[in-house]
Image (spheres, helix red, strand yellow):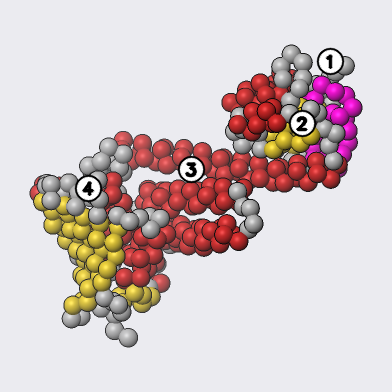
Amino acid sequence: MLDAPLTSPSATATRPKVLVIDDELGPRESMSYLLQDEFAVQTVDRVDRGLELIARESFAVVVMDIRMPQKNGIQGLEELRKIDMDVAVIMMTGYGALASAQAAMSLGANEYLKKPFDVDVLQQTVRRHAGEALERKKRSALLKQLEGMYESVKMEQKKHQMQVGYGQAAAEMVHDICNPLVVTIGYSNMLLDEARHMSDGSPSMARILHYAERLENCSSFCLHLAESWRQSSRHISKSETFDLRAAARETRSVLFFDSPRIEVEGDEGARIVGVRFEIMRVLQNLLKNSLEAGATRVAVSVQKKAHLVVLAISDNGAGLPPETMAVILKKPVASTKAHGTGLGLTICRHIAAAHHAEMKVDSRPGGGTVFTFEFPLATD
């Protein structure tokens, strides 16, 4: 029995995969039988055999007994987490030992059940954790793909130092879409964490709804950037009249997690005509640059002056030398940051010109930087 061969029941490829590790034939086969209608179940009788399978295949759930010969479930769990951080692990114990269960949870187990197990509880527990594990695996795969794509594009940009215009949008898209996507992933993680720790439901549910609203806003922003890239020659025709101060507040809220270092002030009704999401791109780039330069306060001011709307972004960062300012205003810039792409300020200048505004910069080394834009005031 101790060297029983692996069993692999036939299952469709669409079923979540479950691995049962238990040295006792009865419980092992019972769990396989109970789960096989909904899951693709494999069983092994030793921890090492299970680890070999996990290294080769991707499972949604691993059900593992704590007390086993040669290598116990606690040791197996510790090694398993070095192979797969996203798989759900349910530990089984026939002794109900609290210390063993606590040790398992501290090493990354998602839940533990007692033997003999309740049939309904086992099925419901595996079903719930399988769904959560598959979502984690999808998110991890997406994050790896995004990081690889971004690093590849960034290396190419640094290698060639290519000149980027408003219509040369491939590199712009990756540059601009990376930050909102990272925010989206961050909110997704918080959403998942809150769901795991919900107790009575009401306070946590309020937070979940709040995060979901931010996710929707941020996803819309990403979608617009992609669409602007695809139809860059026609995006200005989609202009609308919008409140510039409201757009600045939305940028602070959605893309910078309501950072206390960013302040937005100014006149109500300061409306301009243009593409709202493009102006948010300008705000995103300039605010991000200020924060990365070490500014502890960034002020966004929107003021109406006669037939103009003046947008000013000022910070208390290190400032820029005169030669750098000259380059910013006359030609595409090379990045002055170790991890920058050099695209942000060029994009801002092109967007401002497309909205009939000129980007001006005033900076003193050690005294901060002020970027100013004068947009035509919308006439209703």
Which residue position is annotated with label 1? 2
Seen at 74% across and 25% down, the residue is 66
Residue 96 bears which disc, if any? 2
Residues packed near mark 3 inside 10 Å, few (<14), some (14 to 19) or many (20 plus): some
Task: State the residue position of label 4.
Answer: 333
Picture quadrant of residue 116: top right
Indicate whether residue 33 is drawn in magenta.
Answer: yes
Q: Is residue 227 left or right of residue 33?
A: left
Image quadrant where one finds the C terminus: bottom left
Q: Is residue 114 above or below residue 142?
A: above
Dot 3 lies on which element? helix
Tell me, yes or no, whether the two marked residues, 4 and 3, touch with CB atoms within 8 Å.
no
Seen from the viewer's position, the closer of residues 342 and 373 is: 373
Q: CA distance from mark 2 to mark 3?
A: 43 Å
Relative to 125, is 257 on the left or the right?
Answer: left
**What residue is pinned by disc 3?**
146
